[in-house]
Image (cartoon, rainbow, N blue to C red):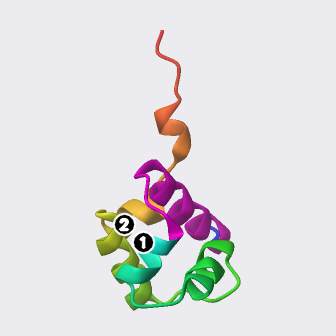
Amino acid sequence: MSQTKVYINIRKIRELKNLTREHVAADLNMSMSGYGKIERGDVDLTVSKLIEIAKVLGVSPEFILKFDISMFFKEVK
């Protein structure tokens, strides 16, 4: 899995849960700018920060790593 996918997954999960960047940043006790850098992949994400983000999003760190948005849009025949 590429690092970029982790950052994209964090953003997509946040959006699917209708959480704002402001809300997540506040729950992480960090600036919105700092959190935005995480979602854009401008900073290296530590395991401890991934765990914190997962808690705020209400998912497991493993869910973030394995998340695939296409699972929500598969056509059923």
- Which amino acid, mark 1? His
Disc 2/disc 1 C-alpha distance (Å): 22 Å
Task: Pinpoint residue 69: horizontal percent, then vertical percent.
Answer: 53, 45
Most extreme residue toward the top is 77
Q: How many marks?
A: 2
- Which amino acid, mark 2? Glu
> Does residue 71 lie above or below 21 as drawn?
above
Task: Pinpoint residue 32: horizontal percent, then vertical percent.
Answer: 56, 82
Judge by depth and name the residue closer to the eye, 30 or 72. Answer: 30
Q: Quadrant of residue 57?
A: bottom left
Q: Residue at x 40, y 52 (%)?
A: 17
Of the image marks 2 and 1, the number of the one nearer the N terminus: 1
Q: Which residue is mark 2?
A: 62
Q: Residue at x 43, y 60 (%)?
A: 19
Q: Which residues are magenta?
A: 3-21
Task: Pinpoint residue 13: horizontal percent, then vertical percent.
Answer: 46, 56
Task: Pinpoint residue 33: horizontal percent, then vertical percent.
Answer: 62, 85
Q: Residues within 10 Å of mark 2 (few under 14, many from 20)?
A: few
Q: Residues within 10 Å of mark 1 (few under 14, many from 20)?
A: few
> What SS does tag 1 mark?
helix
Q: Which residue is mark 1?
A: 23
Judge by depth and name the residue closer to the eye, 11 or 47. Answer: 11
Q: Residue at x 59, y 70 (%)?
A: 7
Q: Nearer the viewer, mark 2 or mark 1?
A: 1
Q: Residue at x 46, y 15 (%)?
A: 76
Q: Main secondary structure of the magenta part?
A: helix
Q: Is residue 36 magenta?
A: no
The quadrant of the rendering that contains the N terminus is bottom right
> What SS does tag 2 mark?
helix
Tell me whether circle 2 and circle 1 mark residues in contact (CB < 8 Å). Answer: no
Residue 63 in the figure: left or right of residue 21: left
Judge by depth and name the residue closer to the eye, 75 or 36. Answer: 36
